[in-house]
């Protein structure tokens, strides 16, 4: 953190670090994750959140379903019966694979801010 006059501001480098939006731990670069139906590009955080990366940002629907099914141990019936904000929480981030950083330009966590090319899903307790 840096001090600017009376205000303490967080360093922008810290804001772009590849950290899980739920536990703030560093996450690994997205990799090919094998599933019963094929694979997806993403990974799993130590807190249990599953993340999926869609570099094109044009197939986020499939990416979302892959991540939701994976967090449900590939039980598709369970995954399809779940409700956002009741059974699980989502966070959308803009990820830059070349530098393994997050972009500050379009990170959204609200229902109307679903821009970004990386999605984290975590089951609620």
Image: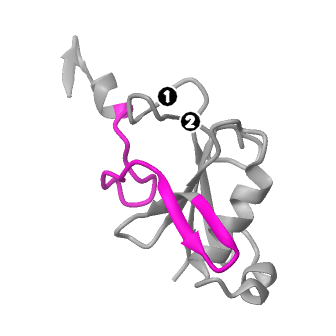
Give the residue pinned by disc 1: 103
Which residue is depicted at the point 73% across and 80% down?
Answer: 79
Q: Is residue 108 above or below residue 50?
A: above
Which x, y percent locates residue 111?
A: 74, 50
Q: Which residues are magenta?
A: 15-40
Q: Is residue 21 located in the magenta-colored stretch of the structure?
A: yes
Name the quadrant containing residue 121.
Answer: bottom right
Which x, y percent locates residue 113?
A: 71, 40
Residue 95 placement, left or right of 10: right
Q: Is residue 31 above or below residue 49?
A: above
Residue 37 placement, left or right of 8: right
Q: Are marks 2 and 1 in contact (CB under 8 Å)?
A: yes
Q: Characterize the magenta stretch by its predominant secondary structure.
A: loop
Which x, y percent locates residue 84?
A: 72, 68
Q: Is residue 63 above or below residue 35?
A: above
Secondary structure of the residue carrying tag 2 is loop
Q: Which residue is outermost to the front?
A: 38
How crowded pointer 1 is (Cα within 10 Å; few <14, some 14-19, many 20+) is rated as some
Give the residue pinned by disc 2: 94
């Amino acid at each position: 953190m840096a001090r600017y006059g009376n205000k303490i501001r967080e360093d922008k480098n810290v804001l772009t670090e590849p950290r899980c939006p739920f536990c703030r731990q560093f996450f690994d670069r997205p990799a090919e994750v094998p599933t019963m139906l094929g694979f997806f590009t993403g990974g799993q955080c130590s807190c249990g959140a599953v993340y999926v990366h869609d570099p094109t940002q044009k197939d986020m629907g499939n990416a979302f379903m892959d991540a939701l099914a994976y967090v449900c141990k590939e039980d598709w019936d369970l995954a399809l019966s779940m409700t956002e904000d009741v059974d699980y929480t989502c966070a959308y981030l803009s990820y830059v694979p070349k530098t393994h950083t997050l972009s500050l330009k379009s990170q959204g966590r609200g229902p109307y801010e679903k821009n970004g090319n990386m999605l984290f899903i975590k089951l609620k307790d």
